[in-house]
Amino acid sequence: MNTKSLLIACALALCPVASAHAILASWYPAEAPHRGPLGSGEHSIVHGMKIYRTPPSRPYIVIGTINAGSGLFGSPRTRAVDKAKEVGADAIILVQTERWPTGGQAWGWGQGTHAGGGIGGLSYTQNYAVVGHYQAIKWIKGGK
């Protein structure tokens, strides 16, 4: 195999397969931004931005939706935070996470469902694409 053919083969192998679930991060602005419900405000911080698992305990406005997917060199959380910063959001709220089986099944040696005998038999691994759905929010100034 010559160098050009090898480079093309490597590029095709590393390119993500296009599918409905292979999104990186998409922004959908709200047609009419609205106040969201208040909650306990359980959250974590990723890249300096709060990601809420429950509605925040302080008043906010939902300015849009972000859908972010897993893939090479990034997670749905980090991609959603990057997109939220890009559109000017103060924080995001996780609404739902989905897992979709991908064609990335593999057989290998290790622990798992053993098809071979002995220590470290042949095992099967199923890979998944993960898509997170988030609300992008801005804080209401003054709290009322």
Image (cartoon, rainbow, N blue to C red):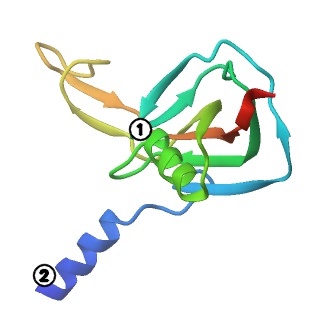
User: Which residue occupies the foreground of this view, 13 or 83?
Assistant: 83
Residue 43 percent across, percent down from the top left: 53, 21
User: Which residue occupies the foreground of this view, 56 or 140?
Assistant: 140
Label 1 – label 2 distance at C-alpha: 47 Å
Residue 78 percent across, percent down from the top left: 43, 43
Q: Residues within 10 Å of mark 1 (few under 14, many from 20)?
A: few
Q: Can the viewer see residue 83 in this picture? A: yes
Amino acid beneath label 1: Gly
Q: Residues within 10 Å of mark 2 (few under 14, many from 20)?
A: few
Q: Can the viewer see residue 22 in this picture? A: no
Q: Secondary structure at mark 2?
A: loop
Residue lying furthest front: 142
For the point 71% across and 37% down, the residue is 141
Quarter of the figure with residue 140: top right
Residue 1 image label: 2
Residue lying furthest right: 32
Residue 91 percent across, percent down from the top left: 58, 38
For the point 21% across and 84% down, the residue is 5
What residue does disc 1 label? 48
> Is residue 24 left or right of 141 when viewed as pictured?
left
Amino acid beneath label 2: Met
Q: Are marks 1 and 2 in contact (CB under 8 Å)?
A: no
User: Which residue occupies the foreground of this view, 16 or 122?
Assistant: 16
In the depicted structure, whether residue 77 falls above or below residue 58: below
For the point 66% across and 56% down, the residue is 27
Return the disc, 1 or 2, that comes first in the chain's sequence: 2
For the point 69% across and 23% down, the residue is 58
Residue 125 image label: none
In the depicted structure, whether residue 60 falls above or below residue 119: below
